[in-house]
Image (cartoon, rainbow, N blue to C red):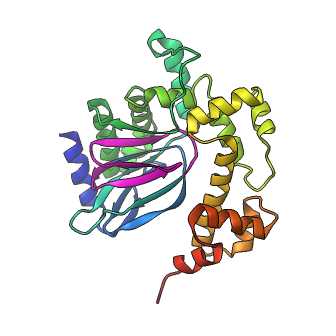
Amino acid sequence: MSKEQIKQFIQNNVSEDGLVETGVKGVQLFRVTEPVRCAPAVYEPSVVAIVSGTKEAILDGNRHVYGSSQYMCCSMSMPVEAGTPAASPDNPLLGVYISLDTRVMTELAIEMESSSAAFRKPRGGPIPQGVALASWDDAFSDALLRLLQLGDSPEDTAILGDGRLRELYYAVLNGEVGDSARRAFGVGNEIARSIEYLSSCLEEKVTIDQMASQVGMSRAVFHRKFKQATTMSPIQFVKSMRLNSAAMKIAGGMNVNEAAMGVGYVSSSQFSREFKRMYGQSPKQWSHAKQPSG
C-alpha cells in the first residue's frame, strides 16, 4: 500500500520531466517520459527508488536493470553508464532519488555495529560491491512514505526532516543491501574512503601505492579488496572515473582539452586514445553527438 501511495504522491507533485525538490535536503522526485540511451556517469552515494518504469546501469560491462520491485543503493562513488532506454509517455519512469549523507550513514552504521553482535560480520568475509539492488520491504516503504509526506508542510519538513531521513537510512542499513552499506560506511570502510579520496583529486596524479597507504594497506591487499568491492582493479577504476567525468563535462559543453586537463590528463593524444577505446568515439565525435540540434 505504501508504494502505491508513494507513486500517487509523485504523480501529484511532478507534472513535467526532470527532478523536483521535496524540501528535504538531498531528496528529489523524478519523472522521465523519453528514452535515454546509457551514457557515462558517476553515481554518488545514493538510493534510487522507482515506482514505475525501469532504469538501467552498466558497471564494468555488467548490466543492471531495476524497476519497482527493487531499489538501488550505491554506497560509494562509482563510474557507470546509466540511462532510461525503455521510458515512454505510456510507460514513464517515476521515482525518488535520495543522496546519502556519508557522515550520518557512518554514524548509524557504527552505532548498529557496536549495539548488536548480529550486525558484526567476519573480517575475512567477501566485500559486497558498491552498487547493489534490494527488494522493497515494509520498513523501507513506510520510511520513504513518511519522509515524502513531510513535503506538504514546510514547518514539519524543517523540524522532522532530518529524523525521517535518518529513519530511511536505518531501513536501508537494515535491509537487503545492509551488509554492503554497513561495510562501506561503518568500521572497515577503507575502500569507500580511498574512493572518496580519489574522487576529490581526479585532476592530480594519484598512484595505487598512495591510495593503499592512505588507508593503511599493502598494495597487494588493497588491490584484492578494491576489486572485490568495485569489480574493477584500482587502475581500471581510476581510468573509468576520469573518462566518465570528462565525458560528462564534454556533454555539458566544456571543450575537450579543458575536460581532459580537468581530470588529470596532460597529453591530449593519450586522452583521445583512451576515450575512443572506452566509448567507441573520439572526444570530438562525442561532443558533436551530444550537442542539441536546433
Quadrant location, the N terminus: top left
Q: Is residue 104 left or right of residue 273?
A: left
Between 275 and 142, the one nearer to me in the picture: 275
The stretch drawn in magenta includes residue 74: yes
Q: Is residue 209 left or right of residue 288?
A: right
Q: Is residue 71 left or right of residue 251?
A: left
Q: Residue at x 65, y 47 (%)?
A: 236
Residue 64 place in picture, x, y as percent: 40, 48
Figure quadrant of residue 219: top right
147 vs 202: above or below:
above
185 vs 112: above or below:
below
Magenta span main SS: strand
The stretch drawn in magenta includes residue 54: yes
Between 71 and 25, the one nearer to me in the picture: 71
Q: Is residue 235 left or right of residue 55?
A: right
- Residue 66 appears in view: yes
The magenta-colored residue range is: 50-79
Residue 18 place in picture, x, y as percent: 39, 65
Q: Residue furthest bottom?
A: 294
Residue 3 place in picture, x, y as percent: 23, 43
Q: Residue at x 56, y 30 (%)?
A: 185
Between 151 and 281, the one nearer to me in the picture: 281
29 vs 211: above or below:
below
Q: Residue at x 77, y 26 (%)?
A: 218
